[in-house]
Image (cartoon, grey):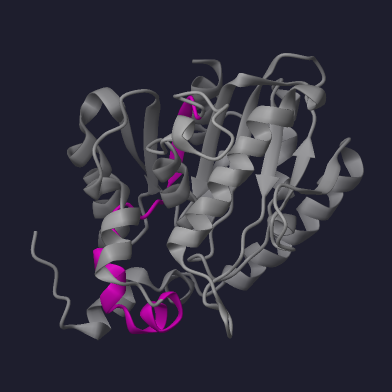
Amino acid sequence: MTLPHDDPAWLERMYNNRALVPDHPAYFARWAQESARARVGLPCALDLPYGDDRSETLDVFPAAQPGSPVLVFVHGGYWRSLDKSEHSFVAPPFVQAGACVVVPNYALCPGAPGRPVTIVSIMRQMEAALAWVWRNIARHGGDPQRITVAGHSAGGHLAALLLTSAWPLMEGADLPDGLVRNALSVSGLHDLTPLMHVPFLQSTLQLTEQQVLQASPALLPAPQQGLLHAAVGGDESEEFLRQCRLIQEAWGTRAVPRCQVLPGLHHFSVVDALARPGHDLHHMALNLLRA
C-alpha cells in the first residue's frame, strides 16, 4: 500500500486520536481517578528506580503468591505525554487473576535542551526497566522466567520491540535470551515511517530515517522466541487497523498468531477493555501470561 505522505491533512486524520475521540479528556480523568484508588486499595511499591534519571521509575503491584507470572504494562501517549500514575487502574484485575503487575515510566519526547529524548532512547529505558524486573521481581512474588509485556499505542510499539532485544549482549551479561516471554500490542504502531510525515508528531518526535529503521518492529526480523498478540479497536482509523495487520504480515503467524480487531472500541476505550475481566482483550492478555 502506498501512503499519501504528501497529504498532511490525511495523515492528521489517521493519527490524531484525540481529535477522533473528542471526549478523550473524560477517559484520562477517569483513568487517573481509578488509578489513585488502585494505589490505595492494593499493596504496591511505588516509584522504584530502575535507572539514574528521574524519569526511570516503576510501580510494582505484587502477586499474592510467589512464582506468579509478571505483566509489565507500558503506557501510550505517542512517546510524548501521559504517565504511569494514570495507568495503575490496569493492575487490579490482573493481580486478582494471580499476576504480579509492573507499570514503568519513561522520559518523554522531545526532552530538554542539551538532553534530547528520542524513541530509541525510550526503548533503551524500557530495556533497562525489563532488566530490573528480571533481576528483582522475585522479591515481589513474580517469576522472572514468565514476563509478558503489554502496551497501548506507543506502549504497544515498545512491547513489540522488546521481543527483538538482544538481552545477553546488554550491560551486565547476565540477561537471558527470551527475557520477554510474550507481548501484547494494543493499538500499537509497528512501522514508524508515516509518523515522519505527520506534522503534529514529527515536530516533537524529530524522527530520522535511521531511527525509523532501528525502532520499527515491522522493519526488523521476527523474534526467534516468544509470541506477540496484536489487537486494535474496530472504530480506530484505517492507519491503526493497517498497523495492526502489518506486524502479522511482517513477522508471520508463528510469531504473531493472533491479530484481532475488536468491534465497537476506539483508541481509548480499548484500554478499558484490557482491564475488564471477561472481555476478549483481557483474556488475550491472560492467555499470554499463562502460556
Count the marks: 0
User: Could you tell me residue 66's position as x and y percent?
Assistant: 78, 14
Q: Tell me if 134 is positioned left or right of 290 in this view.
A: right
Q: Tell me if 20 is positioned left or right of 286 in this view.
A: left
Q: Residue at x 85, y 41 (%)?
A: 45
- Whether residue 90 is visible, yes or no, is no
Q: Residue at x 20, y 31 (%)?
A: 252
Q: Residue at x 69, y 24 (%)?
A: 99
User: Could you tell me residue 35's position as x and y percent?
Assistant: 77, 52
Q: Is residue 185 magenta?
A: yes
Q: Tell me if 239 is positioned left or right of 18 in this view.
A: left
Single out the residue that lies furthest toward the front: 172
Q: Residue at x 41, y 84 (%)?
A: 203
User: Could you tell me residue 54's position as x and y percent?
Assistant: 74, 63
Which quadrant is home to the N terminus?
A: bottom left
User: Could you tell me residue 151's position as x and y percent?
Assistant: 52, 46
Q: Is residue 203 magenta?
A: yes
- Whether residue 129 is visible, yes or no, is yes
279 up-or-down from 27: above or below: above
The front one of 273 and 255 is: 255
The front one of 184 and 23 is: 184
The front one of 27 and 54 is: 54
134 up-or-down from 238: above or below: above
190 up-or-down from 193: above or below: above
Image quadrant in which you'd find residue 177: top left
Q: Residues in magenta?
A: 180-205
